[in-house]
């Protein structure tokens, strides 16, 4: 990798600004001053420093966000705030993207990364990655609904969903439930409850595969995944 590209990727300025940085003699590779922007470096084996401070290079970034309502799960939008707008510049420079989507009014777990291979594995319809949601339902959720979801319900467009695991936490005029599904159809949870004559009034994603929402994250907050969480995701093999 060229030294100017590496420094630019890490947020030390534009290519032009990085070239000026190099010309000043501030950058060393293995204790040798490097002024040539085209100098090739191996980020994994070479020691790169700026003004005596060692630079740690990372190719990938993995972020867990507690998505707030009103924010779009997209990289850009001309009308609404996106999840990328919530990122600090030090994280945004890695150009992460949301893995999957949550509806605008849905809260909860959202993974952002620039690791395209991992994202593909988690999003592939063939992988059947389970996602668990907590929801408040306008209507009494019954054992009959549990059975219906277990078989798969027919959505408004005629599509029959794969089986979902529905758990009733509180039954009443406003029921509270947990639902685990392995698909990601548009508005799927809401449409599944519409199929049994009920309405979702609050929805929050709690898990995605082995990843569990950090309860200490306030709405709109995010953090980097721990090494353990990253290893779990990379080793995860959905059924």
Image (tube, rainbow, N blue to C red):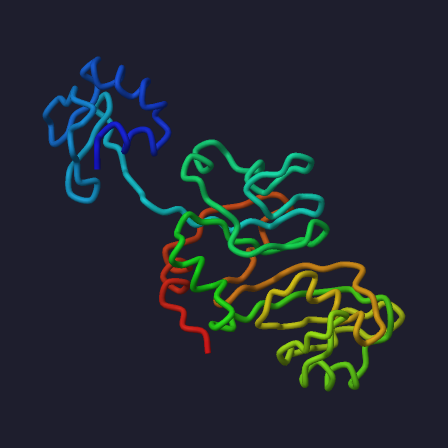
Q: Residue at x 47, y 31 (%)?
A: 89
| Horizontal side of residue 180 vs 50, given as left or right | right
Residue 117 point in image, percent of width and height: 38, 57
| Horizontal side of residue 224 vs 65, given as left or right | left
Residue 112 point in image, percent of width and height: 49, 49
Residue 105, placed above or below residue 178: above
Residue 217, placed above or below residue 91: below
| Horizontal side of residue 172 vs 191, given as left or right | right
Q: Quadrant of residue 26?
A: top left
| Horizontal side of residue 32 vs 149, given as left or right | left
Q: Residue at x 69, y 54 (%)?
A: 106
Q: Nearer the viewer, residue 69 or 75?
A: 75
Q: Quadrant of residue 174?
A: bottom right
Residue 185 point in image, percent of width and height: 64, 65
Residue 71, placed above or below residue 3: below
Instruction: Name the quarter where the N terminus is drawn.
Output: top left
Residue 218 point in image, percent of width and height: 63, 47
Q: Quadrant of residue 222?
A: top right
Q: Nearer the viewer, residue 78 or 6?
A: 78
Q: Looking at this view, name the residue that lies furthest to the right.
A: 173
Instruction: Count the labels in the image.
Output: 0
Q: Residue at x 57, y 72 (%)?
A: 182
Q: Nearer the viewer, residue 169 or 15?
A: 15
Q: Nearer the viewer, residue 205 or 184?
A: 184
Residue 27, placed above or below residue 141: above
């Amino acid at each position: 990798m060229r030294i100017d590209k590496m420094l630019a990727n890490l947020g030390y300025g534009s290519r032009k600004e990085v070239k000026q940085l190099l010309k000043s003699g501030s950058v060393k590779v293995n204790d040798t001053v490097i002024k040539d922007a085209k100098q090739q470096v191996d980020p994994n084996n070479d020691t790169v420093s700026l003004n005596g401070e060692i630079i740690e290079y990372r190719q990938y970034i993995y972020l867990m966000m507690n998505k707030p309502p009103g924010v779009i799960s997209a990289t850009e939008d001309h009308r609404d705030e996106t999840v990328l707008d919530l990122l600090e510049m030090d994280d945004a420079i890695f150009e992460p993207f949301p893995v999957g989507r949550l509806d605008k009014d849905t809260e909860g777990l959202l993974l952002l990364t620039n690791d395209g291979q991992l994202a593909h594995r988690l999003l592939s319809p063939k992988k059947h990655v389970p996602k668990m949601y907590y929801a408040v339902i306008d209507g009494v959720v019954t054992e009959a609904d549990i059975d219906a979801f277990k078989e798969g319900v027919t959505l408004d467009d005629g599509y029959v969903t794969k089986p979902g695991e529905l758990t009733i936490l509180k039954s009443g005029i406003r029921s509270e439930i947990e639902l685990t599904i392995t698909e990601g159809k548009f508005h799927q949870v809401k449409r599944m409850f519409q199929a049994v004559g009920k309405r979702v009034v609050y929805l929050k994603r709690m898990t995605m595969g082995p990843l569990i929402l950090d309860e200490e994250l306030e709405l709109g907050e995010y953090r980097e995944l721990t090494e353990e969480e990253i290893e779990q995701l990379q080793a995860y093999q959905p059924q």
